[in-house]
Amino acid sequence: MISIIISTQDKVLLDRLSENINETIGVDFEIVAIENKGLYSICEAYNTGVSKSNFPYLCFVHEDVLFKTKDWGIRLISIMKNDPAIGLIGIAGTKFRSTYPSAIGQGPGLRKFLRGNIYHWDTYKDFDISNQQKELDDVVCIDGVFMFSKKEVFECCRFDDKLLTHFHGYDIDFSLQVFFQSFRVVVDRSVLIAHYSNGNYVGQNTIANRKVGRKWLRKLPVATRDTHLSKIKIRYLDLINWIYFLRTAIERNIKNILKK
C-alpha cells in the first residue's frame, strides 16, 4: 500500500528504520532506498524513488528517525481516502509563508503559525502554541523530515531537481506546489516521530530558500484560509519579517567589520 522512499547514506540507520517501520506501519509497504552519498540532490533521489515505487501512497522520510505511533500507515491512508482533497501530510509545518526566504516558522510573529510536534532526541517538542490545537490542521508548508503523499499528486507536482541541486528547500517548494494545485496540505499531530539529528543549516540552506523564494515570489506571501488574515495583514506581516531580517543582516555585517 505504501512506498517508503529514503535517500540513504548510512546502512545502520536504514536497517534500524526499516525494522521500526515493519513494527509500526500496520499495512503492506516497500522500502525504496536510494543510496546517495553525495551523488544526487535529494530532489533527484526522491524523484527516482517515485519512478521505482509500486504502491499508490508515498512516504518520504529521513533515515535518522523512528516512529513512535502504532498503525500510522493505516491512519494516514484513511485520512486521504476520507478526504481526497488532501495531497500532502506532515508532522510539522506552518500556516504562513513569507516572501522572505527563511526556514519554516523563522521570523517575528511567525511562531504562532507553527503546527505539529516531534520527539527530538527523545525529548518531546510541541510547535503548536495555539489555544485550539487540532489533531489535523491545514498548513501551507511542512517540514521534510516526514512527507506523506500519493501518486495522484505527482501527476502535477514533483521535486524540482532543476532548481534545487543540494539537500535543502525541497520540502518548502514541494509543499507550495501541492498547495497551489488546490490540494490540502495538513499536519497530523497524532503521528509521533523521534528525530535523531540537529539538522543542517549551512549556507546551502540559505541559498536554496532564496531560490524557492524567487520561484514563488508572485504567489507569496500566503496563509491558510482559517487564519482569517486579510491581504493587508498578510502583507504587513511579510514586511515586518523583511525589515527584521535586513536589520539583522546589517548588524551582523557591522560587527564583522568592527572585528577586523
Image: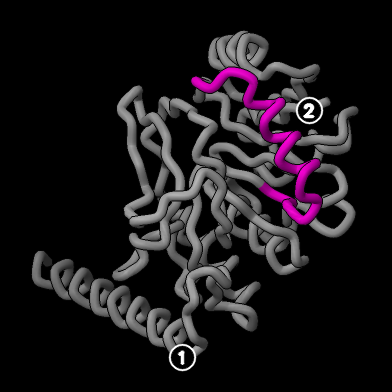
The image shows residue 83 at horizontal and vertical percentages of 76, 49
Q: Which residue is mark 2?
A: 3
* Residue range highlighted in magenta: 68-88
| Left/right of residue 73 with respect to residue 64 in the rendered view | right
The image shows residue 191 at horizontal and vertical percentages of 54, 32
Whether residue 11 is visible, yes or no, is: no
Please tell me how crowded label 2 is: few (under 14), some (14-19), or many (20+) other residues with Cα within 10 Å: many
The image shows residue 202 at horizontal and vertical percentages of 41, 49
Residue lying at 68% horizontally and 35% vertically, measured from the top left: 76
The residue nearer to you, when weighing 231 against 103, is 231
Q: Identify the image quadrant of residue 180.
A: bottom right
Looking at the rendered structure, the kind of residue marked 2 is Ser
The relative height of residue 108 versus residue 202 in the rendered view (above or below) is: below
Q: Which residue is mark 1?
A: 232
Element type at mark 2: strand
Mark 2–mark 1 CB contact (< 8 Å) = no
The residue nearer to you, when weighing 248 against 132, is 132
Looking at the figure, which quarter contains the N terminus? top right
Total label count? 2
The residue nearer to you, when weighing 209 against 229, is 229
The image shows residue 197 at horizontal and vertical percentages of 41, 30
Element type at mark 1: helix
The relative height of residue 196 versus residue 156 in the rendered view (above or below) is: above
